[in-house]
Amino acid sequence: MLLSVDSLQVRYGKAPAIHELSLCVSAGEIVCLVGPNGAGKSTCMLAIAGVVEPAHGDIQFEGRSIRGLPPETIARAGISLVPEGRRIFGRLTVRENLVVASGAQGGVGQAKAQFDRVLALFPVLQERYNGYAGQLSGGEQQQLAIARALICKPKLLLVDEPSLGLAPLFADRVFQTLRSLREDGTTLLVVEQSARRALALADRTYLLRSGRLILDGPSNVLAADPEFEHAYFGGARRP
Amino acid sequence: MALLCLIAVLGGPYLTDIATEAMIYTVMAVGISIFMANSGIVSFGHVTFALVGAYASAWQTCCAGMRGVFMPGLPQFLLDSKTPVLLAALVASLLASVVALVSGAAIMRLTGAAASIALLSLLFIVKTIYENWDSVTAGQSSLVGLPLYVDMWTAFGFASAAIVIAQVYNASSFGLLLRATREDEAAARASGVNIWRQRLIAFVISAFVTGAGGVLYGHYLGTLAVNVFWLDMTFVTLAMVVVGGMRSLTGAVVGAFAVTGLRQTLLALERGVDLGGVSISLPSGAQEIALAVILLLILTFRPQGLVGDNEMTWFGGARDSS
C-alpha cells in the first residue's frame, strides 16, 4: 500500500472538518474523492500534504507515518500537491516555477531529464517558458501547477479540484493529462466535485459528505449503483 | 553611476557630500532590499543592523587614545586593537550578521505583519540595550573621533559591492526559492521549500550589507549616537525601498538617490533661500512631511514603485526581475 489514511480526524478550531476517514491508495492507481461542498475532500488532501495537522488518526506513506511532518518534508518524501485554485508563483517565470519545485528531489542530471519529460507533456509551457506564470490563462496555469508538482518525480500526486474555474473544454484536457500520467506510472489521488468526471477517471472512488465516508468502491460499480446519486446529494443511505 | 560621480566631483563639495550620502544610503537600502524584495516581508527593524555595525566598527577603530575614556568597558583586546578600517568594517558587518542569525532564528518563523512587528521590536530591544550599555557605547552621549575615511569613492566602492552581493544572491537558487515563498507560502512549502531556512539566509546576508551601511555612516559623520539609528532612519530607508520599487534591487538604488536628493533639497529650503533680499524658508519638519506625502502618493498611484519590478543590467538594458 502506497498511502493509507487511518481514522483521520481534522478540526478547524473546534469545528470538525473530517469526522473519521480511512482510505488507501495502491501504487499505480487513480483514486478519486468526490462529494459536495464542505465534504472535507480538500481538507483530506491538505492533511496528507502536511498543510493542516490532523487531530486524530494516522497517515502512512510507504509504511511510515508522515502525520505531523511539515509539508516540505512530505514533499521531499515523494508526495506532491497540486493545490486547489492552482496557486502558482505568479511573478516568477514558468521556468522558475518548475525550478523551485525541482529542488525537492534528485540531482542535476536527473532533473534535466525530468524537465524534458514534463515539458513534453505540456507543450504550451515550453512556448511560454520565460514568460511570467501570472500571465498564463487559467487552463495554462492549471497545467503549470500540475507540471510543478510532477517536476520532482513524485510517487504520489495529489490533485485538488483540477477542473475548478476552467471551461469544460479545458477541464477535459486536464483530465486527459491526468490519465496519461497514470500510463507513465504515477499514482494519483484526485479530488473532484463532478461525480461524472471522477467516475470516468478513477479506478476506485470514495464518496464523502459532511466529513464522513458515505460510499466507496470500484468506479464502474459505483457508476452503475443507483444508490450513488442519492448518496451524493444527501438523505440517509437505504439499507 | 561612474558618470554621476564624475559630475559630482566637478560639482563642488556640496554635491559631493550629497552623492556620498546617497551612496551610503544605497548600501543600507540595498541591504534591506535583499530581504524585503525577495521575502515580501516589510522590515521595520533593519536599522538595528546599521546600529550594530556602526558601533562594532567604532569599538575597533574609534578615537585613538581616548577609546578607554569613552568606552572603558571594552575588553582589553579591543582597547588595544589597531584594526585597519576596512578589516574593521568587515568584522563589524559580520557581527551584524551574527545578530541577524540569532534573532532571525526566532523571527523568521513569523509571517507577514507579525514578522514586521517582531522586527520593529528587535530594533527597540537592541537600541535600548545600546543606549544603556554605557561602558561600551557611551550610552546616550555621542562618540566622537571616528576615523573619517569615507569619501565619495569609498562610498561608491561599498555601494558597488553591496549591489554585487545583492545581484549574486538574487540570481542564486536561494533568491529564487525565497521569491517563491513571497508569491505563495503554502505552495512553496508543498514544493519542498523550507521557508524558515530561506528567509534566514536572506536575513543574514541583508544584515551584513545593512551593517556595512551603518559602518559607513559612522565614519562619514565621525560621530556616533545611538538615537541616530532610530525611527527617522527606519522611515527614510524604508521610503527609499518603497519609492524605488519594493521588489526590485534597481528600485532600492534609484530610491536611495531620489529620496536623498529630495531630502537635501528640502533641507536647503528649510535653511532658507535668498530671493532678491527676502529670505524664504520652509518651517523645520517640512522635510519629513514632504517625504511622507510623496510616500503616500507613490503608494496610492504607483504601489510597485518608480521602477516597478524591473531590473537594470550592468549594461543598461532592462530585463525582467528573474
Image (tube, coloured by chain):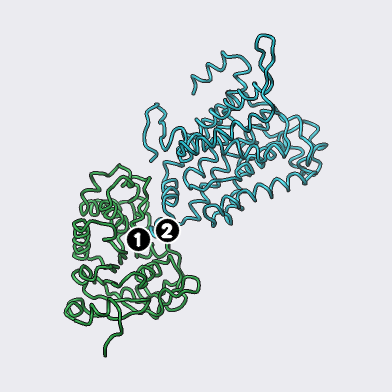
Chain colours: A green, B cyan
Residue B75 relative to residue A181: left or right: right
Q: Report the Cα–Cα distance between label 2 and label 1.
A: 9 Å
Residue B314 lies, in percent from the top left, at 42, 29
Residue A7 lies, in percent from the top left, at 40, 81
Residue placed most toward the observer, A9 or A165: A165
Q: Residue at x 49, y 34 (%)?
A: B244
Which residue position is annotated with label 2?
Answer: B186
Res B66 → quadrant: top right
SS at badge 2: helix
Residue placed most toward the observer, A230 or B234: A230
Dot 1, crowdedness within 10 Å: few (<14), some or many (≥20)? Answer: many
Q: Residue at x 52, y 37 (%)?
A: B241
* View extreme (bottom): residue: A239
Which residue position is annotated with label 1?
Answer: A83
Q: Amino acid at mark 1?
A: Pro
The chain letter under disc 2 is B
The chain letter under disc 1 is A
Residue placed most toward the observer, B259 or B87: B259
